[in-house]
């Protein structure tokens, strides 16, 4: 027996079967308070037309479908590229083509796979092995070959679609150089049968959708039933359960890859909660993305960073209070910069735009929040008419910071009249502005700018009519 064959047998023997759902559920929990709060916020937008909501959820699907291939290294993306393609902005097809002739077919196959997932989600029957194999066929439709280790080294071989593996596919982790065991070839059908039975159990069907999604995803990657494409299938299959609960997939961006792999590795070591928490956070990100994209399309913007400041003392989240103050100021600045970008594109001799920070203002009504230590500072965004006079549209936002500043606590930009606020988790601002938050800021400023212009137009129309 060759050394390679001996190694395969050792890795086969090292395979650790996935846990039962009863064991998974006994060692995990979901923060349902946060889940319910985010969903309540989205549901408050129920007055919007079904077409607008459908479009917002389509954008989330395109984010998920594009970055799922990037996570596997099939192609590279950056924030602006994903942004452009997901929102189908000008020249998005050209930018997609610039990535290579194989990228668009891969993206379209992954889009069709998420359409198939939505179809699965709307059906009342439980998930079957046949459905999982069909999902693999969909997601890998545009992939002709895969790289496999043979006795003579790496080779490209035809990828069997919709069929379980016939060769071992233990993974060499590039991050730490160790081999990771997956289900042996002869055990794979048995493990898949066992997984489907778990997914049909009463306990699983009654569980929270985040628990369902995390468990299904984790078990599938543990088994690794297909020659290639297991990660893409797992992420798509997990979205069946969020589609059923909130009509949207789970968006995992390529920038989340390291945290994603860390959470999976923690689960391999028995810490299943790490992956449940990761999937919950990504689900909440998706809810916020859909909520912010309900009204207007995105315009790409460069990623903003934030410099760390010396800590005076630490909060429960491990942040210095000066660091929290600086993050709030940075958030205000980025929001103002985004407003300036919007109005600089639509400058007119008939109106003047001004954005400024004004010292002073009221304090927070919630005792869990505080003003910056440097004092109150509010952001004012103002439109004034050059003609007729005395016409203006104004938005004022007060900055409030969480006193304890835990990772999941939120910085608030609260509108003075209480009609609208913008919130950002501290962990999305420190140590730098996250990609998802930058997307939300752009959506927010686009929407508010549109509201201000509509208000301004209405006031001008009334004055002009009164002079006739």
Image (cartoon, rainbow, N blue to C red):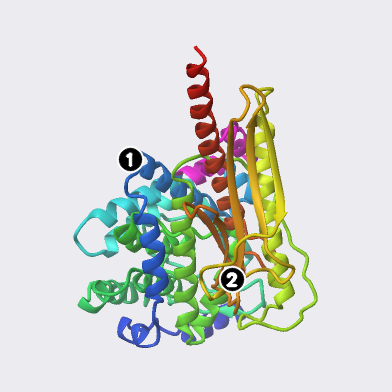
Query: Which residues fall within the magenta stretch?
Result: 85-108
Closer to the camera, 200 or 381? 381
Q: Residues within 10 Å of mark 2 (few under 14, many from 20)?
A: few
Q: Residues within 10 Å of mark 1 (few under 14, many from 20)?
A: few
Left or right: 291 in relation to 388: left
- Alpha-carbon distance for marks 1 and 2? 36 Å
Residue 20 locus on image (x, y percent): 33, 83
Write the residue at 39% across / 77% down.
30
Question: Could you tell me if residue 73 is visible in this image?
Answer: no
Residue 211 locus on image (x, y percent): 36, 74
Write the residue at 58% across / 46% down.
395
Residue 108 locus on image (x, y percent): 46, 42
Helix, strand or loop under label 2? helix
Indicate whether 435 appears above or below 36: above
Q: Which residue is mark 2?
A: 259
Closer to the camera, 8 or 289? 289
Q: Which residue is mark 1?
A: 49
Residue 195 - label: none
Write the residue at 50% across / 32% down.
454
- State if disc 2 and disc 1 touch (CB < 8 Å): no
Question: Could you tell me if residue 79 is visible in this image?
Answer: yes
Residue 35 locus on image (x, y percent): 39, 68
């Amino acid at each position: 027996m060759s050394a390679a064959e001996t190694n395969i047998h050792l890795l086969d023997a090292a395979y650790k079967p996935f846990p039962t759902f009863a064991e998974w559920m006994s060692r995990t929990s979901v923060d349902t308070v946060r889940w319910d709060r985010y969903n309540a916020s989205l549901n408050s937008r129920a007055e919007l037309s079904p077409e607008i909501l459908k479009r917002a959820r389509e954008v989330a699907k395109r984010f998920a479908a594009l970055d799922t291939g990037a996570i596997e290294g099939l192609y590279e993306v950056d924030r602006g590229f994903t942004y452009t393609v997901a929102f189908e902005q000008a020249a998005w097809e050209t930018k997609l083509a610039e990535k290579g002739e194989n990228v668009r077919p891969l993206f379209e196959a992954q889009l069709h796979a998420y359409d198939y997932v939505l179809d699965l989600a709307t059906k009342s029957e439980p998930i079957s092995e046949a459905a999982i194999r069909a999902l693999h066929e969909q997601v890998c439709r545009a992939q002709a070959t895969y790289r496999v280790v043979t006795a003579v080294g790496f080779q490209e071989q035809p990828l069997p679609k919709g069929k379980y593996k016939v060769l071992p596919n233990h993974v060499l982790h590039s991050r730490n150089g160790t081999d990771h065991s997956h289900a042996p070839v002869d055990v794979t059908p048995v493990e898949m049968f066992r997984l489907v039975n778990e997914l049909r159990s009463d306990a699983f069907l009654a569980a929270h959708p985040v628990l369902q999604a995390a468990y299904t995803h984790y078990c599938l990657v543990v088994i690794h039933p297909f020659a290639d494409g297991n990660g893409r299938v797992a992420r798509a299959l997990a979205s069946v359960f969020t589609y059923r609960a909130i009509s949207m997939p789970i968006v995992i961006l390529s920038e989340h890859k390291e945290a994603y792999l860390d959470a999976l590795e923690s689960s391999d070591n028995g810490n299943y909660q790490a992956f449940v928490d990761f999937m919950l956070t990504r689900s909440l990100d998706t809810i916020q993305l859909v909520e912010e994209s309900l009204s207007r399309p995105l315009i790409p913007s460069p990623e903003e960073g934030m410099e760390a400041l010396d800590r005076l003392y630490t909060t429960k989240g491990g942040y210095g209070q000066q660091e929290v103050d600086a993050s709030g100021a940075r958030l205000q600045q980025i929001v103002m910069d985004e407003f300036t970008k919007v109005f600089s594109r639509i400058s007119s001799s008939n109106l003047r735009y001004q954005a400024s920070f004004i010292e002073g203002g009221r304090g927070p009504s919630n005792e869990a929040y505080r003003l910056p230590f440097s004092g109150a500072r509010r952001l004012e965004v103002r439109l004034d008419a050059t003609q007729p006079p005395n016409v203006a549209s104004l938005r004022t936002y007060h900055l409030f910071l969480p006193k304890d500043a835990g990772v999941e606590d939120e910085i608030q930009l609260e509108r003075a009249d209480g009609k609208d606020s913008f919130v950002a988790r501290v962990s999305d601002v420190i140590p730098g502005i996250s990609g998802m938050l930058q997307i939300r800021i752009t959506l927010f400023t686009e929407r508010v700018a549109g509201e201000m212009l509509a208000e301004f137009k209405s006031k001008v129309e009334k004055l002009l009519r009164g002079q006739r």
